[in-house]
Structure formats: structure tokens, C-alpha cells
Amino acid sequence: MTDLYAVIGNPVAHSLSPAIHGEFARATGQDISYGRLLAPLDGFKAAALEFREGSGMGLNVTLPFKQEAWRLADTHTPGALAAGAVNTLKFEDGRIAGHNTDGTGLTRDLKDNLGCAIRGRRLLLMGAGGAVYGVMEPLLRELPQEVVVANRTLEKAVALVGHFEMLQKFASRGVTARPYGALTGLRFDIVINATSAGLTDVMPPLPRDIFAPGALAYEMVYGRSTLFMRFAVECGARAAGGLGMLVEQAAESFFIWRGVRPATAPVIRSLRQKDEG
Ligand code: NAP
């Protein structure tokens, strides 16, 4: 019998996950069906449990349900525990296991696809929402030199840095929160835009000399060249969009569910071609 999986969210019609997992299944010969599940804003738990009752084996969870998925899970991986959010649920032996694969998706894309080491580097993360909570623990485990979190609402960046205090030791020069206005004079090797500003083609206010020589500007929004990416290139940095992260986090979910690691490069390539086509 074909094993059932889905991505649950609201909205969910735009999700590329069915196409990505369909490609993974075809390439690895896994007999799965992967669909979209639109849950009412007040109906995540009921929809997820109903999917499990109908022989569903796992769910990817997208906005705005990642925290609710965390509460639904019986067990959490260290990354999911630290993030307080879950993007992958595995239904197994009557229990629900919660994972967060966003951070692994980002670190794999940076290191393996973009050839950008994290160890010993200076990182600037812009934003203090769910995406940053999801990626902090895996980024810190790569032993960067320093992580600065900048956010429009400074209190949220301060709260985020406090939340990860136990992991501060992984960055030799620590993790700090700053308003955008206090970035002047600082240089970073990796600048990650984890705000949703790219969706509306605005960008956080950055000084032009924020990028160290050879720096990478990483935009979590995918499928478009954003103002931040164009700004970074003008300032001499290399820019990359978040498609690789999306495909890598999906590959990690696929591995959690199926025990098989799909190749990601062909899927990233084909989605990029569709984008450009
Ligand atoms: P979120 O929880 O809603 O947080 C949004 C963040 O963006 C907040 O920190 C917010 O600042 C900031 N922001 C929004 N508009 C801004 C503006 N005009 N100027 C400056 N800051 C602004 O969203 P999220 O879940 O963290 O997701 C963030 C982005 O990452 C989304 O675009 C999402 O699609 C993307 N993402 C991509 C992947 C991937 O696989 N590629 C995975 C996860 C997320 P305030 O706190 O001041 O409101």
C-alpha cells in the first residue's frame, strides 16, 4: 500500500513540497503519495490527527502551525526542542515524533551547495521570527566566531538571544542582539536575511560596508531576486536565495520518514530552471 504524507498549513496551495517529495520518491523508488492539507486556522490538531487516523505516516508543517506541531509531538529532537517549533512530524507506533529540519536545510545549503564554511565565521542574522528560532541551534553547532541578531523590533531579538543563552558557548565571541542602527562599522562573512521583507521587495536598512571581502548574502525567501540580494551584489558580495534550503530541509524530512537520503542537486536545478523558464 502507498504510504501517505502531506504538508499541512494555511495557506498551503503555494507549497513546493509536493513537487519536491514527488521528485525524491521517483528518484529513490519509494512508494509514497504526498499531498497538501489545508487546515483551518483553529483546526491544526484535529486535521493532523485525522490525517494520522487515515493511515498518514508523516507531515511537513508550515506557517502558522509550527509551534502547535511542537505541542502536538510526544518527543522532540534537540534542534526542535531548542527551536520550540516543529516542521516535520513522524507518526510511529502510536507516538508522534517532532523534528525541525529547517536548520539542517540551511547549514547543508551553505556548506555543501554553496561551499560556504560556517566555522570561525562572523554571522549576521536579520529577523527574529520562527525561521531564526529554527536555524539558531544548527548554526551554533557549526562553531561560528560570532552571531549578531538584528531585528526591527529589538525586544524580539533580545528575547531570542536569551532563549539560546545555553548555546552561546558555541560561538567563540558570543551571540548578541542589535538594532539595525548599531551595525555601523561591523563586517560579516555571512549575512542571512530571515525576515519576510523580501516578499514585498523591501529590505532592512543595512550599511553598504557590512559585507566582509568574500562574504555571502543569503536570502531565505526563494523563487525571486530580492532587493537584499541585489543590494549585496552591488556591494561586492555573493548572493544566494533560499531554494536550496527548502530542498535540503525536505531531503532531511524524507530521510527521517524513509531512511533514504535523496540527491538534492537535480531537484534544486530543475526547480531553478522552472523559475527562470
Ligand atoms: P515571521 O516569524 O513572521 O518573522 C518575520 C520577521 O521578519 C520578523 O523578525 C519581522 O520583524 C521581520 N520583518 C518583516 N518585515 C520587515 C521589514 N519590512 N523590515 C525589517 N524586518 C521585517 O516569519 P519566519 O517564519 O521567521 O520567516 C521569515 C522568512 O523566511 C519568510 O519569508 C519565510 O518564507 C522564509 N523561510 C524560508 C525557508 C526556506 O526553506 N527557504 C524556511 C523558513 C522560512 P519584526 O519582529 O520587527 O516584526
Image (cartoon, helix red, strand yellow):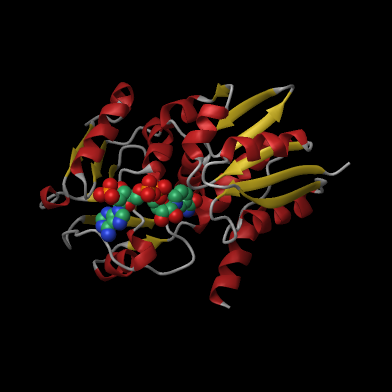
Q: Nearer the viewer, residue 275 or 11?
A: 11
Q: Residue furthest right?
A: 1
Q: Nearer the viewer, residue 82 or 38?
A: 38
Left or right position of 154 against 139 = left
Q: Quadrant of residue 155?
A: top left
Left or right position of 251 against 171 = right
On the image, the x and y values in percent for residue 106 come to 46, 46
Q: Quadrant of the N terminus?
A: top right
Left or right position of 262 against 273 = right
On the image, the x and y values in percent for residue 120 come to 31, 37
Residue 210, relative to residue 84: is it above or below?
Answer: below
Q: Residue furthest bottom?
A: 277
Q: Quadrant of residue 211?
A: bottom left
Q: Residue placed at 54% from the left, 51% from the top? A: 10
Q: Residue placed at 59% from the left, 71% from the top? A: 273
Left or right position of 183 against 166 = left
On the image, the x and y values in percent for residue 116 come to 41, 49
Residue 69, relative to residue 193: is it above or below?
Answer: above
Residue 251, relative to residue 144: is it above or below?
Answer: below
Q: Quadrant of the C terminus?
A: bottom right
Q: Residue placed at 17% from the left, 60% from the top? A: 209
Q: How many marks?
A: 0
Instruction: For residue 214, say whether it is visible.
Output: no
Q: Residue placed at 34% from the left, 56% from the top? A: 216
Q: Nearer the viewer, residue 97 or 116?
A: 97
Instruction: For residue 211, say whether it is visible.
Output: yes
Q: Nearer the viewer, residue 140 or 40?
A: 40
